[in-house]
Image: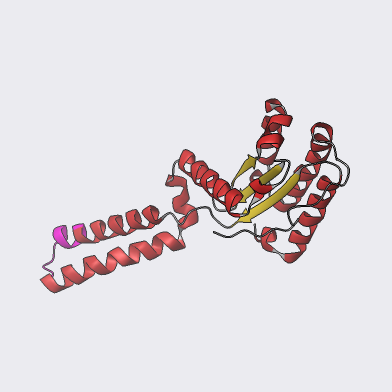
Amino acid sequence: MQTFLTIEFRKELAKIVSEIELSSEVEIVVGIKPMSSFYYELYLVSGILTSFLVFTFFMFYDHVFGDYLIYMGTIFSFFFGITLGFILKDVFKFFIPKKMLQRNVEIMARALFQKGGIHHTKEKVGVFILFSIFEKKHFIVADRKAQNSIPFEEWKKINSNFEKVFKHKESSKILTEELLKTKDLFSKFLPPIENDINELADDLEINL
């Protein structure tokens, strides 16, 4: 997954985006984020569960513990649990509902679409594709003309193809391959126009 964050991969991605835009009217931006939410509730639950287990041990173990040890041990275990949740977040992720993971990726994608000004293209042909590594999910936000020009079934195919990215060991390779496949589709439904101006940087980096 770290391949996504290398300079070499970013350059290759920008090259493919440039090819797509030269062959169509679409203005496409691909975003890759380590995660779409900090999932504070995950760490909080981990802390509460750890402190509960430690407190239960103090209460029911066949030994008399001092009040101070019980008090400080329970508090310490709470913060230890939070730290443990952060370290093992990839393991604890499996306890997060898939709908929540997808929702957070969608929220991040829509926020970055607005923050990056992708909706400001003159012909409303901006398309933003977000890939979120922690959640292993993606989400596409398309502006009005791009959304309406391409049939719903074709958008479904694009989404289905991008779902392969995180199911493969060579994720970065699959991402570039599937992105390149959209070139003909965008060219068909959004053919290039004369004097088309590249309104968005091919390697646009957006941060909230």
Query: Residue 130, percent across and down?
Result: 63, 48
Q: How is the image coloured?
A: secondary structure
In the rendered image, which quarter is residue 47 located in? bottom left
Q: Is residue 66 visible?
A: no
In the rendered structure, the answer to whether residue 57 lies left or right of residue 94 reads left
Q: What's drawn in magenta, residue-wise?
A: 56-65
Relative image position of residue 52 (x, y in whole percent): 24, 56
- Looking at the rendered image, the quarter that the N terminus falls into is bottom right
Residue 192 image-quadrant placement:
top right
Query: How many numbered marks does the figure carry?
Result: 0
Residue 94 seen in this snapshot = yes
Residue beneath the point at 25% across and 57% down: 53
Q: Is residue 131 left or right of 90 when viewed as pictured?
A: right
Q: Residue at x 73, y 65 (%)?
A: 7
**In the rendered view, would you say 197 is above or below 102?**
below
Q: Position of residue 177 (x, y in %)?
A: 78, 45
Residue at x 20%, y 71% (from the top left corner): 72
Asked if the magenta segment contains residue 43, the reply would be no
**Foreground pick, 8 / 51:** 8
Q: Give the side of residue 130 with respect to residue 83, left or right.
A: right
Task: Determine the residue positioned at 62% across, 58% down.
Answer: 206
